[in-house]
Amino acid sequence: PKTTTKEVPPKVTYVVDNSKDGTYRNEVVGKPSITTTTTTYVYNETTRTASEKTTETVTDGKPTVVTLGSRPTTEVTYQDFNTRYVADETRMAGEKVTETQGVRGSTTTETTYSVNTETGVVTPTKGQPVVTAPKDEVIKVGTKPMIQTTVISKNTFYQEDRDAAFESKTTLSEGRDGSTTVTTTYTLNEQNGEVTSSTKTETVEKEDKIVK
């Protein structure tokens, strides 16, 4: 006998799965159909000739199944927020308090997908981006001036008065205390939140008390 085989490639079937993203693709390879042809020869002794007998056996195959997703996908990109520093003269120099928490901005783009179940071609369509602007972070920084005053006590001087009665005293000048005042002011760099200081000193001279 003579045997020949013929294979027929499996058909491709496309299936849409709405629960999978539009970028999803999964292929399960099928099996080809096989046709087996067997030819046998029968010899006839009377006629002394041979005749052919042909039989065919078909083994069914399985189709290749390609599953394609069609669920929309979302792409999000983020933008950092800016930080602003604001001077606060009610707080100690350098003290920082967050007044407003910063929020990142975002750009969201949704892509939808259409699937051709005849050809398996997936066509993406991008929608309009949805933009949310970032929200600045605001930090208050203390710049309260610092004032330090040092008192310079006056002295009392006594002058002799030979014409006055014994132990009598006359105040010629009450005098006054002097002082040294150091004022430190602070300047805020609104770009980086750094605080720099400057100092000013004022002196009031004392005046001594004089008693005669």
Image (cartoon, rainbow, N blue to C red):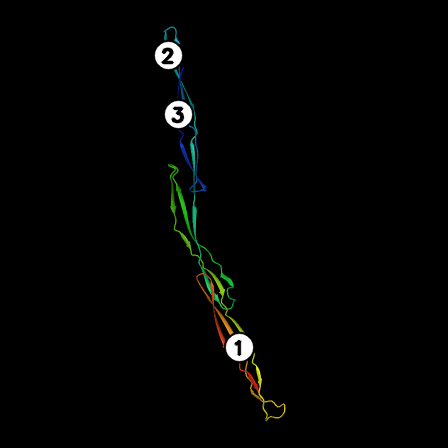
Q: Are marks 3 and 2 in contact (CB under 8 Å)?
A: no
Would you name the residue on which mark 2 appears? Answer: 51
**Where on the picture, by quarter, is residue 123?**
top left
Mark nearer the N terminus (1 vs 2): 2
Q: Position of residue 77 (x, y in %)?
A: 43, 51
Q: Residue at x 41, y 34 (%)?
A: 13
Mark nearer the N terminus (1 vs 3): 3
Would you name the residue on which mark 1 appears? Answer: 179
Q: As rendered, which of 172 and 48 lies closer to the eye?
A: 172
Q: Label 2 sits on what residue type?
A: Ser
Helix, strand or loop at label 3? It is strand
Mark nearer the N terminus (3 vs 2): 3
Q: Position of residue 58 (x, y in %)?
A: 42, 23
Q: Quadrant of the N terminus?
A: top left
Q: Label 3 sits on what residue type?
A: Glu
Q: Label 1 sits on what residue type?
A: Ser
Q: Is residue 166 left or right of residue 7?
A: right
Q: Residue at x 50, y 76 (%)?
A: 203
**Where on the picture, by quarter, is residue 28?**
top left
Distance between mark 1 and mark 3 Cα atoms? 112 Å
**Where on the picture, by quarter, is residue 192?**
bottom left
Asked if residue 48 is positioned above or below residue 36 in the image, the reply reads above
Q: Nearer the viewer, mark 3 or mark 2?
A: 3
Q: Is residue 49 left or right of residue 152?
A: left
Q: As rendered, which of 140 and 189 lies closer to the eye?
A: 189
Label 3 crowd bin: few (<14), some (14–19), many (20+), radius 10 Å: some
Q: Nearer the viewer, mark 1 or mark 3?
A: 1
Distance between mark 3 and mark 2 Cα atoms? 27 Å
Helix, strand or loop at label 2? It is strand
Q: Are marks 1 and 2 in contact (CB under 8 Å)?
A: no
Q: Residue at x 51, y 74 (%)?
A: 181
Q: Position of residue 95 (x, y in %)?
A: 52, 64
